[in-house]
Amino acid sequence: QVQLVESGGGLVQAGGSLRLSCAASGRSFSGNAMGWFRQAPGAEREFVVGMSYNGRSTPYADSVKGRFTISRNNAQNTVYLQMNSLKPEDTAVYYCAAGYTATAAVFKAAYGYWGQGTQVTVSS
């Protein structure tokens, strides 16, 4: 019954932008940390960014800092990932996740609910 559904992925040229959305249903995640992870072909799923329940803590992976921005609308039970200045190395399946607790974390084990993923492809 609990679902996280990502949308907004697609094909974009290097230097372009995409905005990913993650809509949660089945329960409220306003009291939980949220995060984005990504997985490139042949690679492990890696942390991109997290956000505490109140948005005050937003740790970013060094590879995306200054280019990506996480935001959330707790009233709509939705989290977003604005991706600017995209690079070919950003190509991956992007996953939204909801944490077990209110505190942002960089480890996959801290997140209990996962979306199905949305493909982001950046061409050179």
Image (spheres, rainbow, N blue to C red):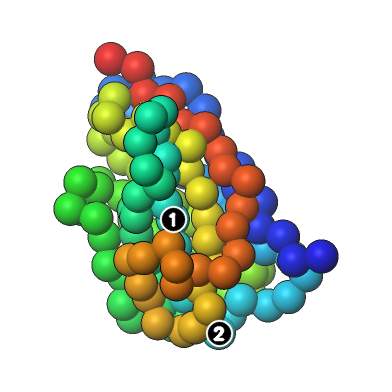
Give left or right: position of 81 versus 64: right
Question: Mark 1 highlights which residue?
Answer: 36
SS at mark 2? Answer: loop
- The three-letter code of the residue at mark 1 reads Trp
For residue 49, what is the image quadrant?
Answer: bottom left
Q: In the rendering, at what x and y percent does residue 97 appear?
A: 53, 61
Note whether 71 is above or below 57 in the view shown: above
Residue furthest to the top in view is 124
SS at mark 1? Answer: strand
- Residue at 65% x, 69% y: name it: 76
Q: In the rendering, at what x and y percent does residue 26 appear?
A: 78, 70
Closer-to-camera residue (112/32) = 112
- Crowding at label 1, few (<14), some or many (≥20) Cα neighbours within 10 Å? many
Closer-to-camera residue (86/36) = 36
- The three-letter code of the residue at mark 2 reads Gly
- Crowding at label 2, few (<14), some or many (≥20) Cα neighbours within 10 Å? some
In which quadrant is the N terminus drawn?
bottom right
Question: Mark 2 highlights which residue?
Answer: 31
Residues tagged 2 and 1 counted as in contact (Cβ below 8 A): no
Note whether 101 is above or below 66 in the view shown: below
Closer-to-camera residue (7/91) = 91
Give left or right: position of 100 versus 106: right
- Residue at 61% x, 52% y: name it: 115
Number of dots carrying numbers: 2
